[in-house]
Image (cartoon, rainbow, N blue to C red):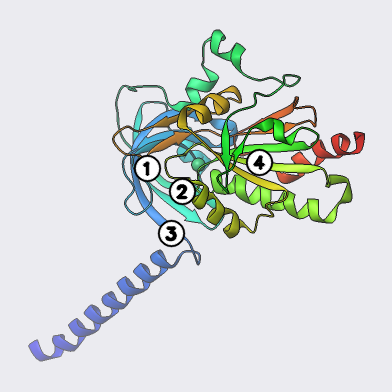
Amino acid sequence: MQFRRLPILIVIVVVTGLLVVAFVAQRSQRRAGERTYALSGQVQSITPDRQEAMVKHGEIKGLMPAMSMPYKFKAKGELDRLKPGDLIDGTLVIVSNDAYLTDVKKTGEAPIEKPPAETLVTGQTLDRAKQLLQPGDTIPDGDFVDQNGRKVTLSAFRGSTVVLTFIYTRCPLPTFCPMMDRNFVSIQEHMKADRALKGVRLVTVSFDPTRDTPAVLRAHAKELDANLSVWTFLTGKEQAVDAFAGKFGVFVVRNPNDERDITHNLRTAVIGPDGVVKKIYTGNEWTPEDILMDLKPVANAD
Ligand SMILES: [Cu+2]
């Protein structure tokens, strides 16, 4: 009896083992090039129409320090169940050009400590809002150095239509600063092919001047295959950069205890050859095609 049961037991153990191996392999395979990270945090605010929540989270080992960022949810149902203040556990998935939260579960609730950066922008006082540039306003000159360490002000671009955006080169999320870079690469491609866009200039301003030195920006430009005769990268003194970026509605919150920790939003502006704001885009919803549409009439007018 004992000896007859043994083979059956071995078969059960082997089959169970194989099933576990197959399950683990399937779980970790997902899509090629996909990286997953465990994320624990607190929901600060929710933007249902973009299927996004601002989440204040702890350090994500190997990816980014503690910060507040808007995250897309893969499943609408998971987001619909949440409200500001909820504590959550979930998985952050990063694919080459995308990032989203999945397997999100509520673990508790807590009072929200301080409003995140994006709320400071939308919920700002009227005084602050009045200082923001609007279409029709002339942009300030600013005080910058370019990727070659040369002093530059924005008046150097008078006579050219300018597309201006703000980034920092170490931004960990593909849907944030790297998306601005990708969109500019795409606009640069169109500029090569379309003579009507000959007079257009691209300007990328870094709001992380401590790390984004001219040399770092030069390397970044090379990585993007940026043509420096049409695309300029700017950095400068932190105060000067913040004052300039703030006029466009860019708010940057730097953690004094960890210089890698930068909470920020995004703004991209189209500026006429006279230095007057034509349009300011919020966040990462705009496409290169949107900007190309803006550029056509402007470029044709001169
Ligand atoms: Cu970023």
Q: Is residue 37 left or right of residue 48?
A: left
Front residue of 44 and 283? 283
Residue 175 visible in this rendered orientation of the protein? no
> What's the residue at 68%, 24% (across, down)?
139
Residue type at mark 2? Arg
Q: Is mark 1 within 8 Å of ligand 1?
A: no
Q: Which mark is residue 170?
A: 2
First-in-chain label (1 vs 4): 4
Disc 1 to disc 2: CB gap under 8 Å: yes
Disc 4 to disc 2: CB gap under 8 Å: no
Q: Is residue 239 above or below residue 93?
A: above
Which marked residue is nearer to the observer: mark 1 or mark 3? 1
Q: Which mark is residue 35?
A: 3
First-in-chain label (2 vs 3): 3
Residue type at mark 1? Arg
x and y percent of residue 116 in the render? 43, 26
Screen quadrant of the C terminus: top right
Q: Which mark is residue 203?
A: 4
State the residue lying farthest toward the front: 150
Residue designated by label 1:
260
Q: Is mark 3 within 8 Å of ligand 1?
A: no
Residue type at mark 4? Val
